[in-house]
Amino acid sequence: MSLTRRVKRLEDRLGISGPEMSILRINLMDVGPDGPIDLGPHIAYILRGPNAGTEIHREDGETAEAFDARCDDLIGGVT
């Protein structure tokens, strides 16, 4: 079963309605002295568009904003 179908089945089961997702971004977390620290998006799966099925990893030194922009470019204007 493809990732797109899995996400769709989960959304259907939870009663989530709305437009289909184009990108699934995964944020990494770390343990901090006062609780979890969000390290931002590090992995993304392109679900729609010409690059559907592509897995993207954040490069060393790449900002979260630059990573998000790179992911958005890969969906090819699909929203």
Image (cartoon, rainbow, N blue to C red):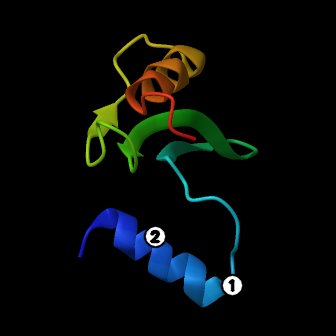
Quadrant in which residue 19 is drawn: bottom right
Residue 53: x percent and y percent?
A: 26, 49
- In this rendering, position of residue 27 left or right of residue 74: right
- In this rendering, position of residue 51 left or right of residue 39: left
Q: How many marks?
A: 2
Q: Choose between 41 and 12: the one closer to the eye.
A: 12
- In this rendering, position of residue 50 left or right of residue 30: left
Q: Amino acid at mark 2?
A: Val
Q: Residue at x 50, y 47 (%)?
A: 22
Q: Is residue 28 above or below residue 72?
A: below
Residue 65: x percent and y percent?
A: 59, 18
Q: Which residue is mark 2?
A: 7
**Quarter containing the N terminus:** bottom left
Residue 36: x percent and y percent?
A: 66, 48
**Quarter containing the C terminus:** top right
Q: Secondary structure at mark 2?
A: helix
Q: Choose between 13 and 58: the one closer to the eye.
A: 13
Q: For the residues marked 1 and 2, what is the alpha-carbon distance in whole angstroms?
A: 12 Å
Q: Secondary structure at mark 1?
A: loop
Q: Which residue is mark 1?
A: 15
Q: Is residue 69 above or below residue 6?
A: above
Residue 33: x percent and y percent?
A: 69, 41
Q: Is residue 65 above or below residue 53?
A: above
Q: Amino acid at mark 1?
A: Gly
List the single residue furthest toward the top.
61
Q: Choose between 32 and 3: the one closer to the eye.
A: 3
Q: Earlier in the sequence, mark 1 or mark 2?
A: 2
Q: Residue at x 37, y 64 (%)?
A: 4
Q: Residue at x 70, y 65 (%)?
A: 18
